[in-house]
Image (tube, rainbow, N blue to C red):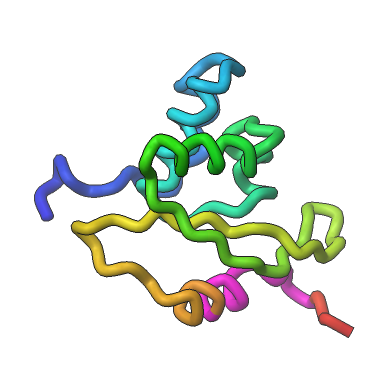
Amino acid sequence: MTDQQKAPDAANVSGLGKTQHGNSSEAQRRRLLDRLRIGPISTLDARRELDILMPATRIFELRARGQRIDTIRIDQHTECGKRHNVALYVLQSDAVPPMSCLEITQRLRSSTQPQGASDG
């Protein structure tokens, strides 16, 4: 992979919502698709990082336009520590072998639980 083909680093991910202005459906779809090309994103993260209040609607529209996007249900903690069952959206690409749901779930479990939080 050349430097030009590399995905933006994590510092640039949060900037997607700021660099692609507008609250139109088209602008939101563009932001969301750009972010999905970097990697999976959850409902809560799409709201917070991309300023998309109804990510499920934008996903529905992207699918209607031919994008292959999988949905995986995950538990994710909000910033105030409450656990919610939310959607994790994964863009499937012919260029990259798709991750299995198990792989994604295992990665997220290790990265989304706040330190010191318990399920009990």
Residue 83 in percent (x, y) is at: 82, 65
Residue 102 visible from this viewpoint = yes
Confirm whether the magenta stretch covers residue 110: yes
* Location of the N terminus (image quadrant): bottom left
- Compared with 110, 87 (above or below) is above
- Compared with 1, 31 (above or below) is above
- Write the residue at 70% across / 71% down: 113
In the image, taking residue 120 as reference, residue 33 lies left or right, namely left
| Residue sitting at the far left | 2
Report the predominant secondary structure element of the magenta stretch: helix
Magenta-tinted stretch: 106-116
Confirm whether the magenta stretch covers residue 22: no
- Compared with 34, 96 (above or below) is below
- Write the residue at 38% across / 45% down: 67
| Residue sitting at the far front | 64
Residue 11 visible from this viewpoint = no
| Residue sitting at the far right | 120
Q: Nearer the viewer, residue 119 or 85?
A: 85
Residue 21 in percent (x, y) is at: 52, 16
Report which quarter residue 72 is drawn in. Answer: bottom right
In the image, taking residue 106 as reference, residue 39 lies left or right, namely left
In the image, taking residue 55 as reference, residue 61 lies left or right, namely left
Residue 105 in percent (x, y) is at: 55, 75
- Write the residue at 50% across / 81% down: 102
In the image, taking residue 89 as reference, residue 44 lies left or right, namely right
Q: Nearer the viewer, residue 18 or 54?
A: 54
Q: Nearer the viewer, residue 74 or 38?
A: 74
* Location of the C terminus (image quadrant): bottom right
Residue 114 in percent (x, y) is at: 73, 68
